[in-house]
Amino acid sequence: MKKLIMMLSLSLISFVLAAQGQNADYNIKGNDAMSILDFSEAKVWYQLGVEDQRCDIYSISKLTHIWKIDESMRASMHSVMERCLKCLNDFSIQNRDTTSIIMLVDYYSEGIGTNKNEDRAEVWKSRLEEVRNQSRITNVETEVKAKREKVKMEFFAGYAATLEAPFGLTFGGVGRTVGWYLRFRTNMSFQSYKQPTFEIDVNGEPSIKGGLNDGLSDFTKRTKVNAYTATGGLMFKVSPSFYISVGGGYVNREFLAEYNKIGIVEANYDPSGPFWAKSDYLDDSSFSGAAIDLDGTFKIGKTFYFSFGCSMFDFKYISANAGIGVFF
């Protein structure tokens, strides 16, 4: 069984090495002789591959094959097989070549070009495992490095909204595991207002706080909200299709009411028209301060995504948010 395994291994090695040396002239002529089973003629040509400080691994594999399949040839092959053994030792020590080491194990186990020596065979078996393990580690490190180099930052952009600020944009990028984002949301209202502030009176209606120095005010029943948030933060890639982002920034909300001004003397509306006033900053309807986002983003295929989460404003108010967009 052991010999069968060795024969199969050697056959496989010969096949792998075929492309390396078989095109040499002496190997071509050796192959021609092998095709008609003229092992003596084949040996003459193949041994040229281990003469004049030449170590042709293809020639060595063919000479080893002849040694194994035709015992009658062995008496005339001791010298050339010793040269093969020396070449294999040089390859194995200098280049840590696994093919040469496998053949060396066979040489010492079978007594090819030397006396049988199981201890030496075991030494080379151990060396073979060391080289293979090192090769595996090197291959893994190379693959990991290649994957890292291949992973480029993906950028994304999309629509973002909360209930009160339904118009917004998100832009960002994400690499292998960590990314970033910037986000701006607004309700598209940028109404200007005068300095007077209002409060809610006993009737539940807004009225100018402290009144006007030069007249009275009349609520027109119109209100408006100026709202916007600007945030940014980090994005973490949990899986190929799911990301978590957390960030912070600034929020501003201004609750406005419209009034007509009535002159004290004329008792008529001011011809300049109505004006807007802002609620007092102590009133919860207007505030500004910190904004915090916490979102989950789901990637659909390679391009589209949708997100949902919540935003906290001024550490008091929480609002749902959502978004859709694309990676590019």
Image (cartoon, helix red, strand yellow):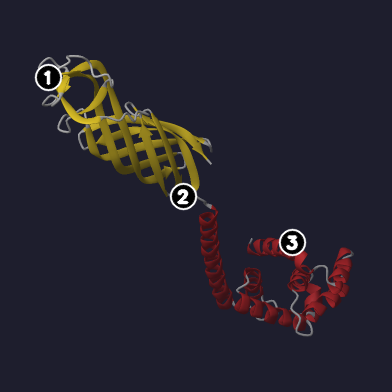
The amino acid type found where label 1 is placed reads: Asp
Q: Is residue 12 left or right of residue 306?
A: right
The residue to which callout 2 is attached is 175
Query: Of the numbered discs in the image, which one, if any, rests on residue 201?
Result: 1
Relative to 211, say whether 102 is above or below. below
Pointer 1 local density, CA inside 10 Å: few below 14, some 14–19, many at least 20: few
The amino acid type found where label 2 is placed reads: Gly
Cα separation, mark 3 vs mark 2, equals 44 Å
Q: Is residue 4 left or right of residue 315?
A: right
Q: Are marks 1 and 3 in contact (CB under 8 Å)?
A: no
Which residue is farthest front?
265
> What residue appears at the point 78 percent right and 79 percent down from the top-left corner?
77
147 vs 134, nearest the viewer = 147
Q: Dot 1: what SS?
A: loop
> What residue appears at the point 79 percent right and 80 percent down from the top-left corner?
75
Q: Position of residue 173 (x, y in %)?
A: 46, 46
Residue 305 seen: no
Query: Of the numbered discs in the image, which one, if any, rests on residue 108?
Result: none
The amino acid type found where label 3 is placed reads: Phe
Image quarter for residue 146? Answer: bottom right
Relative to 43, say whether 172 is above or below. above
Query: Of the numbered discs in the image, which one, if any, rests on residue 15?
Result: 3
